[in-house]
Amino acid sequence: MNWQQRIDNALSERRAAEALRTRHVVCQGAGRWLTIGDRRYCNFSSNDYLGLSQHPFVVRAWQQGAEQFGVGSGGSGHVSGHTVAHQALENELADWLGYPRALLFISGFSANQAVIAALTAKEDRIVADKLSHASLLEAASHSPAQLRRFAHNDVRQLASLLAKPLSGQQLVVTEGIFSMDGDSAPLCAISETVQQTQAWLMVDDAHGIGVVGEQGRGSCHQQGIKPDVLIVTFGKGVGVSGAAVLCSDTVANYLLQFARHLIYSTSMPPAQALALRAALQVIRSPEGDDRRQRLAARIAQFRRGAAQLPLAVTGSQSAIQPLIVGENARALRLAERLRQQNCWVTAIRPPTVPPGTARLRLTLTAEHQAQDIDRLLEVLHGGE
């Protein structure tokens, strides 16, 4: 089989399974409304949970940063790309989240890949929640360490895996809020279990930072734990993009020497770092509290109405509200029906989620109005 045949066969298999991914050219769409061509939809597929991507204060900060620094960093942070703007953001993140150090990365995916690749060796074991994000599981499977997965949020099975003999070290990996199910990890119980061993705990809080906890400090702060390594990303509740690793001085110095994704990638534009500081200022302010309260109200409103739907509603209390459909084709039909009624919803199918659990992944934001939720529920109650 030659290259072209291999590619054609793979695409044909995806198409036959109703699992082929497509992209849509969006004219405008990070906030409440999404525009494609000349049609506008109420957007229920945005991770911009607090609506900060459109916030005037954040937008102005990026504009002013571009005027001061230009639109790019010009190089890796190890060469010439680490500016006063980057350093100020790292310092603020470390202070806000209670860690000695923070290191900026261009994305959450690269941060997860970098940390796992740099920390683990052949004799080590990674013990990860089965539903951890693809960036975590892929990094673990490609690392020299052995990968063992525990059933989703099953602390007892985690303890059993950690108890198995090993000559090296163990790294426990989980998310704060899971991206496809929207539920929270039992971080307190996980942390207590990890502390009974010599393992380290790494938490990816992409969907919790900015959204939950006092001042939006995230899932770990909300549950009263401090993992050895905390990953926060900025493309969800913070409303921008990029990520940071929060850790000790020693680990930060180690990553600066051995994290290839950090060493060999151009750093984020300094203007972006200034926009992120502006977003953090909003998140930590009374306005941030107000936005979190508005989001909580929309979540509660949706869940009250969704309880009557002929679809499986998960126990998620987060901004991620999946409706489990089952079959790929049915999920696609429902998503299309919603779009015909000007509600933009994405159908998520395997391999992103387990086989037989295709779903509508609804995301709610602080920018949604009560009438938006009412309209969404009205269309959903209308059936297929």
Image: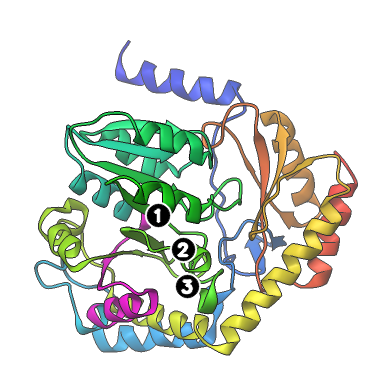
Specify which label sits upstream in the sequence, 1 or 3: 1
Location of the C terminus by quadrant is top right
Residue at image location 19% in from the left, 60% down from the top:
251
Magenta residues span: 87-109
Pick the front one: 67 or 318: 318
Residue sticking out furthest to the front: 196
Disc 1 and disc 3: Cα gap in Å? 13 Å
Q: Residue at the spot x=41%, y=55% of the render?
A: 204
| CA gap, disc 2 and disc 3 | 8 Å
Name the disc covering residue 217, or none: 3
Q: Which mark is residue 220?
A: 2
For the residue labelled by badge 3, is the local secondary structure a helix, a strand or a loop? loop
Between marks 2 and 3 in the image, the one whose residue lies nearer the viewer: 2
Q: Quarter of the image holding residue 299?
A: bottom right
Quickly name the residue at label 1. 203
Q: What's the colour scheme?
A: rainbow
Q: Is residue 140 above or below residue 329?
A: below
The quadrant in which the N terminus is found is top left
For label 2, the SS is helix
